[in-house]
Image (tube, grey):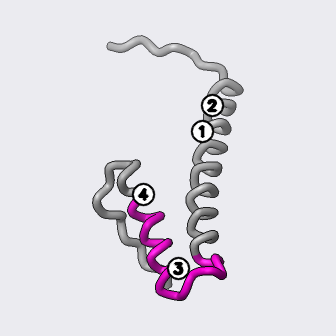
Amino acid sequence: MASLTAVPIDFVDAVAAEMARGVEAAVERWLSKIEQALTDRELTTLGRLNAVQEVLHDYKSLTGKKDLKSTRIA
């Protein structure tokens, strides 16, 4: 039987909060790149689409993902 180690709740909360901040910052960075691609007035509509596709390609390359899980928005 494994022994259990008591971990103070405030430590667990601090670690969880730090992880949440990191995730939020990463999501915001990627969304910012997409927003920049979509609002670049120097690009045509097709250019904007290509810029967004490039952001997705970069994300997949950096994370090693080939496909993203699909979720349908109602």
User: Is 18 on the left or on the right of 49, as rendered?
Assistant: right
Q: Earlier in the sequence, mark 4 or mark 3?
A: 3
Label 4 to label 2: alpha-carbon separation:
29 Å
Q: Report crowding for label 3: few under 14, some 14 to 19, many 20 or more residues within 10 A (C-alpha).
A: many
Viewer-side residue, 50 vs 9 = 50
Relative to 45, is 21 above or below? above
Q: Which of marks 3 and 1 is in front?
A: 3
Quarter of the figure with the N terminus? top left
User: What residue is rendered at 36% in x and 64% in y?
Assistant: 68
- The range drawn in magenta is 38-59
Q: What amino acid does circle 4 point to?
A: Asp
Q: What amino acid does circle 2 point to?
A: Val
User: Residue 49, how many percent across, how many down?
Assistant: 47, 80
Q: What amino acid does circle 3 point to?
A: Arg
- Write down the residue under mark 4: 58
- Write down the residue under mark 2: 15
Label 1 to label 4: alpha-carbon separation:
23 Å
The answer to whether marks 1 and 2 mark residues whose Cβ atoms lie closer than 8 Å is yes
